[in-house]
Amino acid sequence: MSQTLLDKVWATHTVRTLPNGATQLLIGTHLIHEVTSPQAFGMLRDLNLKVLYPSRTFATVDHIVPTDERAEPFSDDLADAMIKALRSNCAENGITFFDLPTGKQGIVHIVGPEQGITQPGTTIACGDSHTSTHGAFGAIAFGIGTSQVRDVLATQTMAIHKPKVRRISVHGKLNPGVYAKDVILHIIRKLGVNGGLGYAYEYGGSTFDAFTQEERMTVCNMSIEGGARVGYVNPDETTFEYLKGRPYSPKGADWDAAVIRWKATASDADAHYDDAVTFDAADIAPTVTWGINPGQAIFINENVPFPSEVPEKDRATAEEAIAHMLLKPGAPIKGTKVDVAFLGSCTNGRLSDLQEVARYMKGRKVKSGVKAIVVPGSQGVASVAESMGLAEIFREAGFEWRGAGCSMCLGMNPDKLVGEQLCASSSNRNFKGRQGSPTGRTVLMSPLMVAAAAVSGEISDAREVFDIR
Amino acid sequence: MALEKITQVGGRGVYVPGDDLDTDRIIPARFMKCITFDGLGEFAFYDARAFAKAEGQTHPLDDQRFTGASILFSGSNFGCGSSREHAPQALYRFGIRAIIAESFAEIFFGNSITLGMPCVVMSSEDIRSVAKLIESDPAAILTLDLTEKKLSIADMDFPLTIAVHAQEALVTGKWDAIADLLEGLDDVRTRAATLPYMAAS
């Protein structure tokens, strides 16, 4: 007893201790995509190694896929070479590939949970830093580099040092118009973009207990933006309910046995944490970023800070941020003109995100001059949203309804900012150049805040735009 | 798969100031459309370099005084953001062989060590002092000694820290884990068989 979920998963997945003290950790589930895997397959070929457990590796294509014209060959030769490489690497090695024609393609962190591949008490790795998303199910999930993708393909393990655990508790009910995205932006703002270095974040408290599985995913997704490579929520009935009946979820008697096992993997009530932080949900307001990292965030009613106001160590970055964002220190962020509204990404491209926005967009119009796009996180999300009539609501409102992929979260496909465009974005990173234009500007926010920006043409308080009290 | 024992890195230095220099800054995503890491070197800090040029300035990596430098100095939280190994690969292929910063993001750190590119920590004061020395004498040869845990330039020594496991991995030539991992394959299969979700595989 007295163990965290991380302790328990670590114990059940430790193969041995390596000579340098690192753990050789079994990675039960390996997710791969087209950007960080081709070099790893190349390394395997060079070393004459094979994929050890092809049935525990799952592939999809997300970063480079166009979201409008999806017929192959893609107009971008490099993107076309990447999807072809993934296709042949999967075929050659007997790996399941949720390819474009399967109807199951999507952003890797949306596809895993949707298929029931992401399960409590497991270890998951993927060559993508937002792999922490899967922690929402009580899995220990790591973003890894390409050499480690090679390691996991060849040995189903990786060398890693056990992180410390920081318990982050959020208590109480969120105010209307405040979402999971605001919670994680607030946590990063308070703990810093490198505050999680060396830690896994365990999220809990009554706010998390009440969250849906998809809300938990939004929070865990951005753990890495706070410097924590791993973030997780203990599995509970909400988790099991979400997983029941999904294609890769256990069935029948196996399901019952799995639920008993999964419950036992949750942290013990008297578990030891290396650190603990508590927040009150009622203190959190709709949050937007003003700078060039996700920690540079303020409530919608706050003013853009003067660099002289921020702690000395953050001052140079704040000055750089102000210069890049073309914002005025001391002025409200509200009212800043928006050129593009992007609703999607592994942070906020799930069905519940689209449902919540559609609920308010019904009968509303995107402001003329704003380019607004909705990019469902997966073909699965897209098809359900279409059958529910959400796509129609978005189209009528003036949003473009696109095919599934990473899209404008990062500039690896045709969806890019142009010049100094400012984007109200439901994605996870506001780094310089992130959305494809070196001078493009990103303001991170919740999906409904993106909708509010789309409707008003400026950064706005969704509670005012949509009359939420 | 015997690897080189990396105990020292010698060469000239270049200082790229800034905190939280993220992986999109180190290698913008649009240059990751590739199926090998070859040729990534020229895209290291691409946008920052282009921006400096457009402003009539010279980015340190384009400054001829520092051409050929192999030890890169920067601020805190270096390499934050994405897990893309393209970032350390781009720096390595640009010619960088060691990075000295106030702190490093975790995934970037691990990716760099796996390439045999040490990431070591120095205080911000010392980094600024060394930056001044490099600025006044760009041809000065620096020696990063991982055994002694110090950086030497001219007749001065600066203390540095590096995670014990990373230091050991570098100096013993075990910085790429694959050989160790492959030795444990029997144990891997035994362990996998105990996990219901893997046992069926």
Image (tube, grey):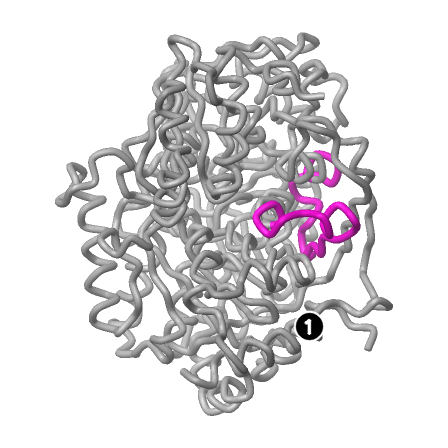
Relative to B151, B188 lies left or right: left
When asked about the image quadrant of residue B171, the answer is: bottom right
Quadrant occupied by the C terminus of chain B? bottom left
Disc 1 crowd, CA 10 A, few/some/many (<14, 14-19, 20+): many
Residue for point 36% across, 20% down? A396
Q: Residue at x 41, y 33 (%)?
A: A390
Q: How far from the left and from the top, in percent, is residue A112? A: 45, 59
Q: Is residue B160 above or below residue A385?
A: below
Q: Is residue A144 magenta?
A: no
User: x, y percentage for residue B138?
Assistant: 48, 35
Q: Which residues are magenta?
A: A188-216
Q: Secondary structure at mark 1?
A: helix
Residue situated in front as seen by the camera: B148 or A280: A280
Dot 1 corresponds to which residue? A265
Residue A186 lies, with reference to residue A43, above or below; the image says: above
Quadrant occupied by the N terminus of chain B = bottom left
- Give the residue at x 79% y 49%: A206
Q: Is residue A31 left or right of residue A35?
A: right
| Residue at left offset 34%, top offset 75% | A54
Tell me if residue A47 comes above or below residue A175 in the rendering. Answer: below
Return the x and y of residue A5 as percentages of the image width and height.
70, 68
Amino acid type for the residue under numbered disc 1: Thr
